[in-house]
Image: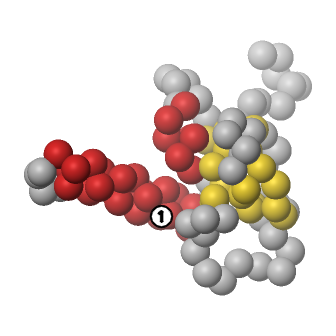
Amino acid sequence: MKPDEPEEVIVACLPLSVASPGGFDDDIYGKCGECGTPIRWRPHSPVGRRLCAPCVVNSLEPGDRIAVTRRTAEDVVAWAASQKAVADLKKGGVG
């Protein structure tokens, strides 16, 4: 990458199916660049490949750069924890 070229980032966006309430009137809506799930993001978010939280978690590779707001980070952590809890329940264990 040349110093004057923008760095490729993955922008973690909220899937509309799990988006927390209280969105903003100027939120932008689109589709996940990986799976096509409807997502939303803020107009001031960085330019990059926009993915839903599940696709971000599933597609990370060493060296990937992720752009995310604190609120989205909290939602991703909560989503990942709920997925682990569901998997643990299916296995008959406790998370």
How many numbered circles are shown?
1
Image side of residue 86 versus residue 26, left or right: left
Residue 82 or residue 11, whichever sits in front: 82
| Badge 1 element | helix
Residue 70 in view here: no
Mark 1, Cα crowd under 10 Å, few <14 / some 14-19 / many 20+, is few
> Which residue is at 55% across, 31% downward?
59
Residue 55 or residue 10, whichever sits in front: 55
> Which residue is at 75% across, 61% downward?
41
Look at mark 1 in the image and give the residue it sits on: 74
> Which residue is at 77% across, 79% downward?
24
Residue 86 or residue 27, whichever sits in front: 86
Q: Is residue 29 above or below residue 31?
A: below
Q: Is residue 53 above or below residue 7?
A: below
Q: Is residue 77 above or below residue 22?
A: above
> Which residue is at 50% across, 23% downward?
62
Quarter of the image where one finds residue 19: bottom right
Query: How is the model colour-coded?
Result: secondary structure
Image side of residue 62 versus residue 40, left or right: left
Residue 35 in view here: yes
Where is residue 95 shown, x and y percent of the image?
Answer: 18, 55
Q: Quadrant of the N terminus?
A: top right
Where is residue 26 shown, x and y percent of the image?
Answer: 86, 74
Residue occupying the far left of the picture: 93
Q: Is residue 22 above or below residue 52?
A: below
* Type of amino acid under label 1: Glu
Where is residue 53 shown, x and y percent of the image?
Answer: 56, 50
Residue occupying the far top of the picture: 1
Quarter of the image where one finds residue 17: bottom right
Image side of residue 37 versus residue 94, left or right: right
